[in-house]
Image (cartoon, rainbow, N blue to C red):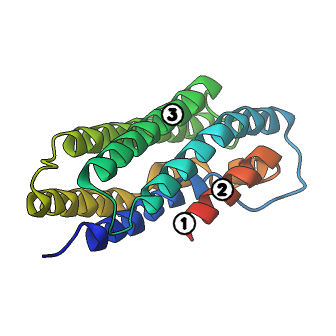
Amino acid sequence: MEGTNPVNKKLTAALSGGAVLVMALSGCSSEDGNEKLDAWAKQVCDAVQPQAKKIEAANIAIQKETSDNSSPEDVQKTDAKAFQDMSDAYKAIGAAVDKAGAPDAGDAKNSEKKQQDAVKELNSIAASYASLKKQVDDLDTKDQAKFADGLKDIASELDKLSTSGSNALKELEEGEVGQAMAKQSSCKSASGAASAAAS
């Protein structure tokens, strides 16, 4: 009988795709200064950094729970907490981008739309992780085969979540905005944390 180990490995692989979303919050640096935009980038990056660490910690927790000798109860508990943490982290990033308002870059109307789309996307990712937590909570840990099947479903949803990705975030960070964010040390460390989680 197949244990939960191969399934957990799938879960881990799918989760590391989620880290790419946080990596989107870096960019390539530029020397052109725009004080308002730099202030906006600092506000967002400073708020993102602790959340990126939370997402990384959740990834690591799930990876640790991938050994064959982990009981379904342990896997369930760890995964549920990790999904809840990720949901909270994405919600907090969404709130930070929302609170920061539209970045002062290019066409103001366009900036505002990009910012609102990114907030919607982050909230939607948060809701997806909250729904995965509920699915993990509902799994039957008494029946190993059923539990493994349930985890497979969750892994494929995670896969979709990590590939549906962060288009709105990427759009928000195009051009000057991405350059301003790349100058912030808190964004650099956030992307470092995320790429460590993705590796």
Q: Does the rendering let one see residue 121? A: no
Q: Quick one: label 1, few (<14), some, or many (20+) residues within 10 Å?
A: many
* CA distance separating discs 1 and 3: 21 Å
Q: In the image, residue 108 lies at what x, y percent?
A: 62, 34
* Contact between labelled residues 2 and 1, with CB atoms less than 8 Å apart: no
Q: Earlier in the sequence, mark 1 or mark 2?
A: 2
Residue 71 picture location, percent across and down? 28, 56
Who's the residue at 32% across and 53% down the image?
Answer: 75
Where does label 2 land, which residue? 193
Res 69 → quadrant: bottom left
**Quadrant into which the C terminus falls:** bottom right
Q: Which residue lies under the disc numbered 1?
A: 198
Visible residue check, residue 44: yes
- Quick check: 190 above or below 92? below
Q: Specify the farthest residue to the front.
A: 69
Disc 3 marks a residue whose amino acid type is Gly
Mark 1–mark 3 CB contact (< 8 Å): no
For mark 1, give the secondary structure: helix
Which circle's residue, 3 or 2, is located before the other in the chain? 3
Q: Is residue 116 above or below residue 31?
A: above
Residue 94 numbered mark, or none: 3
Amino acid at dot 2? Ala
Q: Residues within 10 Å of mark 2 (few under 14, many from 20)?
A: many
Q: Label 3: few (<14), some or many (≥20) within 10 Å?
A: many
- Residue placed at 62% from the left, 46% from the top? 53
Front-most of residues 38 and 6: 6
Q: Earlier in the sequence, mark 1 or mark 3?
A: 3
Left or right side of 135 for 127:
right
The Cα atoms of the two marked residues, 1 and 2, are separated by: 9 Å
Q: CA distance from mark 3 to mark 2?
A: 19 Å
